Image (tube, grey):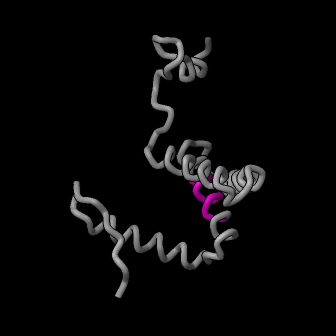
Amino acid sequence: MTDDDSDRAAGPDGLAPTRPVFAEPWHAQVLALAQEMVARGCFSARQWADALGLALREAEAGSAPDTDDTYYTAVLCALETLSSAETGILPAELAERRRAWREAYESTPHGQPVELRPRT
């Protein structure tokens, strides 16, 4: 077994991984959301695969490092692209929502739930 294989080796029970499968909770959440959207027919598995492949190629072309964060950022980008195409939500609207969430997150005291309030 090589050093690279040891990261993928099963745990003591032979099935459980020896390290977390996802580095961050949002990594699991974005994949689960994409899977649910395919299951509900929001877009097809083929559309998902094509969008993810394109996002990964764009990350590579932009010299993004080959890391988990790069992969999951591509997953998020693909999900946003498909969501925009299927719902009519414009990229500017997504950017505004992202800005609002960031503002809400940064202004929320540690340990408190983040609340996105309507802008007045």
Q: Is residue 68 above or below residue 74?
A: above
Q: Is residue 61 visible?
A: no
Q: Is residue 94 above or below residue 21?
A: below
Please give the name of the residue rendered at 47% of the width and 69% of the height, measured from the top-left corner. Answer: 98
Please give the name of the residue rendered at 51% of the width and 46% of the height, measured from the top-left corner. Answer: 27
Q: Is residue 92 visible?
A: yes
x, y percentage for residue 3?
57, 18
x, y percentage for residue 8?
57, 22
x, y percentage for residue 113?
27, 60
Residue 112 in the figure: left or right of residue 75:
left
Name of the residue lying farthest toward the front: 40
Q: Which residues are magenta?
A: 73-81
Residue 110 in the figure: left or right of residue 82:
left
Please give the name of the residue rendered at 55% of the width and 47% of the height, measured from the top-left corner. Answer: 32
Residue 6 in the figure: left or right of residue 50:
left
Residue 74 included in the magenta stretch of the image: yes
Residue 77 vs residue 118, the one in the foreground: 118
